[in-house]
Image (cartoon, grey):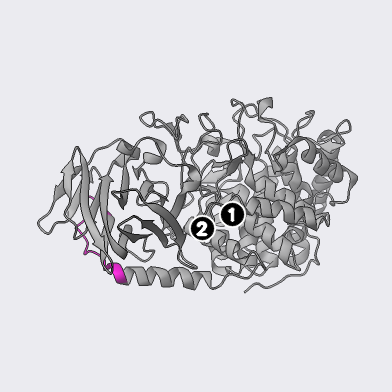
C-alpha cells in the first residue's frame, strides 16, 4: 500500500518528476516527460506496479529535508548500529533523464536493502532485464530503456532487482538510473559528485532571484522552487501537478489526470511569477500561452499538453487498483473537450497584465485577441461546464459569466492604454450587458448573495473571485453578502469547500475535501476587506497544512486530517505565494488584478 500523500516529497529536472516516500521508496515516476507513461506506479497500485526503495534492513528513525534553496532531498535513517543519509535528485542539465541516489555514511555502519521494480506502461509491462559486462543493468520494453549504474552487486529475484550492502561512516555509495530511448546507444554514466554540485548550483542560482515575503519568505521560496520543478523547461508550460488520479475523496471516483497545463491558472501564474521576481519564467509562461491558444477562436481549449498539444484522450488504467482503492485511475483528461467561458477572461486578462507590466510587447497577440472577443460576443450567453469542469449538464455559471465580463473589460483597458484599434463602443455595451445580467440572474435576494449558477440557491467558492477581478468592489453590499454566505455555508473546519458536492451539480457522487486554493482566496478577500487579523489567521492555518518539506496537495480532508488530491498542486502553491504577498506587500497582487491601483504601465525586472 502507498504511503499517505503528505509522506511524499518531490524531485525533478524541469521535464519530469518523481515522488519519494519517507521510507526511501520512489513510488511514482513518468519518463521522459511529466505526461509520459509511468515506470514506477506503486502510488496508484501495489509495489509490483513499480517502485525503487533504498532503506535500512532494520527499523530506523527517519527525518528528511531539502537542502537549502534546492530540490535536492536528504532523508536521514538512524538505526542502533549507525546512521546514513540518502540524497535524491534529478540533474536538470542532464541530456538523458536521470535519478541520482547517493547514500552517505554518517555514523557507525548500516546494512541496507535495495528493491528495484521497473514496470513500464503505468505498471503494466515487465521489461527484459540484462546485466552487461561492466555490471550495468539494462531494462528494455518496446520504445523504453532504463539503465542502472552502481558499484553495488545486484541480483535478479522474481522479476525484480535486489541488493544488500553496508555503508560505513565516511563512505558514499552511488546509484544512477537513466532513461534512454531503446533504439539509442548507451550514454556514458554521469559523475555523481559533479552532478550533485551542478544541481545544487542550478537550484540555488534560480532561487536567489526570489523576492522576500516578510516572515513567510522561506515557505514562499519553497513554493516557488516547487513551481519551477512543475515547469516543463523546453516550452515554459506549467503542469497542474505531476500525478494522476490521487483522489479528492479516498475510495471515491473523483480522480483526474493533472499532468497538463490549464488556462484557468493563466493570470494568477503570470502575476505570481512577476511579483516574485522571476521575469524569465513569467515571460516563458506568457509565450507558452500565446502559442497554445493560437488558431481558430472556436477551438480554444480548457487545457493543453506540455507543448500545447490539443488531443488529450482520457483512458482508464484498469490494471491499477488506485490509491487506497480509489478508482478509476485515469490517463488523459477529456475536460479538454468542454466549453469553459472563463478561459477567455483568463487569456485576455493575462495578456493585459503582461502588457501593463512591460513583460510583453504592447501589441503582442492583439490580433488574435480580437478574434477571441468576436467569438466570445457570440457565445457568452451559452451555458458551459464552469471553472470546476463539471461532468454533468452545462449551466449558466455565475463565475463563467463574470470572466466573460473580465475579457471585455481588460480588452477595453488595453485598447485605451495602448491606443489599439478596437470596437470600443460595442465592447462597452457587452461589458455593461454582462454585468447587468449577472447582477439580475446570478444574485439571490433570498440569500443576499451571488450564487453558483442562474436560478440556483447553491454557493460556489469561485464567487470569491468577483471582487478579486474587479467585477464589483469588495464593499458592495452584494459582495459583502456573498462573502458572509460562503463563510456560513462553505466553511468546513475553517477551510473552504468549492461548492456543496451533495448537490451533484457536477454529475459525480458526493464527497471531497476542502479546496486549498479557494481557502487562500478567502484570505485574499479578507485583505481587501481590511480584515488583516482574519486573513493572517487563515493563512497561518493553511501554511500549517504543508507537509514536513513544505508541499501542498489540491485538497485537505479535515475529518481524517490528511492531504488529498493530486500532489504537489501548482494551484495551491501559486495561491500560497499570492496570499503571502497580499499580506506583506504595499502593492498587493489582489489589488493589481482588481485594477485598484493606478492604471499606469509598470516595468518589472
Q: Position of residue 388 (x, y in %)?
A: 63, 38
What numbered label is drawn on residue 573?
1
Front-lying residue, 188 or 371: 188
Task: Report x, y in % for residue 474.
Answer: 84, 51
What is the secondary structure assignment of the residue under circle 2? Answer: helix
Residue beneath label 2, please? 226
Q: Give the residue at x 63% y 29%.
A: 506
Residue at point 30%, 41% (across, down):
120
Q: Quadrant of the N terminus?
A: top left
Question: Magenta stretch?
Answer: 179-193
Out of 238 and 148, give the one closest to the viewer.
Answer: 148
Which residue is located at x 88 percent, y 30 percent? Answer: 446
Q: Residues within 10 Å of mark 2 (few under 14, many from 20)?
A: many
Nearest to N terminus: mark 2 or mark 1: 2
**Label 1 Cα neighbours within 10 Å, binned few <14 / some 14-19 / many ≥20:** many
Farthest-out residue, front: 80
- Image side of residue 227 versus residue 584, left or right: left
Give the quarter of the figure containing the C terminus. Answer: bottom right
Distance from disc 2 to disc 1, alpha carbons, whole Å, reads 8 Å
Say whether residue 181 is visible. Answer: no
Q: Quadrant of residue 441?
A: top right
Residue 11 painted magenta:
no
On screen, residue 551 versus residue 234, left or right, reads right
SS at mark 1 in the image:
helix
Instruction: Verify CB contact (< 8 Å) between mark 2 and mark 1.
Output: yes
What is the x, y in percent for residue 265? 61, 51
Amino acid at each position: 500500500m502507498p504511503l499517505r500523500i503528505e509522506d511524499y516529497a518531490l524531485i525533478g529536472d524541469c521535464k519530469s518528476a518523481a515522488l519519494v516516500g519517507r521510507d526511501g521508496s520512489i513510488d511514482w515516476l513518468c519518463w521522459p516527460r511529466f505526461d509520459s507513461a509511468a515506470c514506477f506506479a506503486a502510488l496508484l497500485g501495489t509495489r509490483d506496479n513499480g517502485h525503487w526503495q533504498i532503506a535500512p534492513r532494520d527499523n530506523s528513525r527517519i527525518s528528511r529535508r531539502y537542502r537549502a534553496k534546492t530540490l535536492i532531498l536528504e532523508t536521514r535513517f538512524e538505526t542502533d548500529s549507525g546512521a546514513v543519509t540518502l540524497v535524491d535528485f534529478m540533474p536538470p542539465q542532464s541530456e538523458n533523464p536521470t535519478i541520482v541516489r547517493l547514500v552517505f555514511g554518517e555514523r557507525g555502519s548500516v546494512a541496507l536493502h535495495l528493491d528495484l521494480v521497473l514496470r513500464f506502461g503505468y505498471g503494466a509491462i515487465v521489461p527484459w532485464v540484462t546485466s552487461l559486462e561492466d555490471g550495468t543493468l539494462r531494462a528494455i520494453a518496446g520504445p523504453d530503456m532504463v539503465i542502472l549504474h552502481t558499484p553495488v552487486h545486484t541480483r535478479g529475484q522474481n522479476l525484480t532487482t535486489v541488493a544488500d550492502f553496508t555503508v560505513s561512516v565516511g563512505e558514499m555509495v552511488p546509484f544512477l538510473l537513466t532513461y534512454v530511448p531503446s533504439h539509442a546507444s548507451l550514454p556514458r554514466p554521469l559523475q555523481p559528485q559533479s552532478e550533485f554540485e551542478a544541481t545544487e548550483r542550478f537550484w540555488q542560482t534560480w532561487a536567489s532571484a526570489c523576492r522576500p515575503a516578510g516572515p513567510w519568505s522561506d515557505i514562499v521560496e519553497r513554493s516557488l522552487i516547487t513551481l519551477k520543478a512543475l515547469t516543463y523547461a523546453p516550452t515554459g508550460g506549467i503542469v497542474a501537478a505531476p500525478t494522476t488520479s490521487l483522489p479528492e475523496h479516498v475510495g471515491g471516483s473523483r480522480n483526474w489526470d493533472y499532468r497538463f497545463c490549464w488556462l484557468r491558472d493563466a493570470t494568477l501564474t503570470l502575476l505570481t511569477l512577476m511579483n516574485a521576481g522571476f521575469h524569465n519564467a513569467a515571460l516563458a509562461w506568457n509565450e507558452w500561452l500565446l502559442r497554445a491558444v493560437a488558431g481558430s477562436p472556436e477551438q480554444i481549449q480548457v487545457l493543453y499538453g506540455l507543448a500545447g498539444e490539443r488531443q488529450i484522450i482520457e483512458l482508464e488504467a484498469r490494471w491499477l487498483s488506485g490509491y487506497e482503492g480509489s478508482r478509476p485511475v485515469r490517463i488523459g483528461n477529456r475536460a479538454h473537450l468542454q466549453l469553459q467561458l472563463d478561459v477567455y477572461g483568463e487569456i485576455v486578462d493575462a495578456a493585459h497584465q503582461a502588457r501593463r507590466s512591460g513583460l510583453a510587447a504592447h501589441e503582442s497577440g492583439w490580433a488574435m485577441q480580437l478574434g477571441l472577443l468576436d467569438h466570445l460576443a457570440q457565445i457568452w450567453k451559452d451555458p458551459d461546464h464552469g471553472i470546476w469542469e463539471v461532468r454533468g449538464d452545462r449551466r449558466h455559471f455565475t463565475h463563467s459569466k463574470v470572466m466573460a465580463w473580465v475579457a471585455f473589460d481588460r480588452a477595453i483597458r488595453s485598447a485605451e492604454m495602448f491606443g489599439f484599434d478596437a470596437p470600443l463602443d460595442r465592447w462597452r455595451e457587452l461589458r455593461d450587458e454582462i454585468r447587468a445580467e449577472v447582477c439580475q440572474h446570478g444574485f439571490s435576494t433570498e440569500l443576499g448573495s451571488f450564487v453558483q449558477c442562474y436560478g440556483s440557491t447553491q454557493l460556489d467558492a469561485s464567487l470569491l473571485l468577483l471582487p478579486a477581478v474587479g467585477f464589483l468592489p469588495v464593499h458592495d453590499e452584494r459582495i459583502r453578502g456573498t462573502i458572509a454566505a460562503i463563510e456560513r455555508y462553505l466553511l468546513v473546519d475553517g477551510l473552504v469547500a468549492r461548492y456543496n458536492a451533495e448537490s451533484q451539480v457536477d454529475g459525480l457522487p458526493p464527497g471531497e475535501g476542502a479546496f486549498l486554493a479557494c481557502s487562500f482566496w478567502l484570505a485574499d478577500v479578507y485583505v481587501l476587506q481590511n480584515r488583516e487579523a482574519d486573513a493572517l489567521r487563515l493563512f497561518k492555518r493553511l501554511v500549517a497544512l504543508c507537509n514536513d518539506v513544505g508541499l501542498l496537495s489540491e485538497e485537505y480532508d479535515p475529518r481524517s486530517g490528511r492531504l488529498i488530491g493530486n500532489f504537489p498542486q501548482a494551484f495551491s502553491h501559486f495561491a500560497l505565494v499570492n496570499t503571502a504577498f497580499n499580506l506583506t506587500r504595499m502593492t498587493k497582487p489582489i489589488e493589481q488584478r482588481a485594477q485598484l491601483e493606478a492604471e499606469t504601465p509598470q516595468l518589472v525586472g
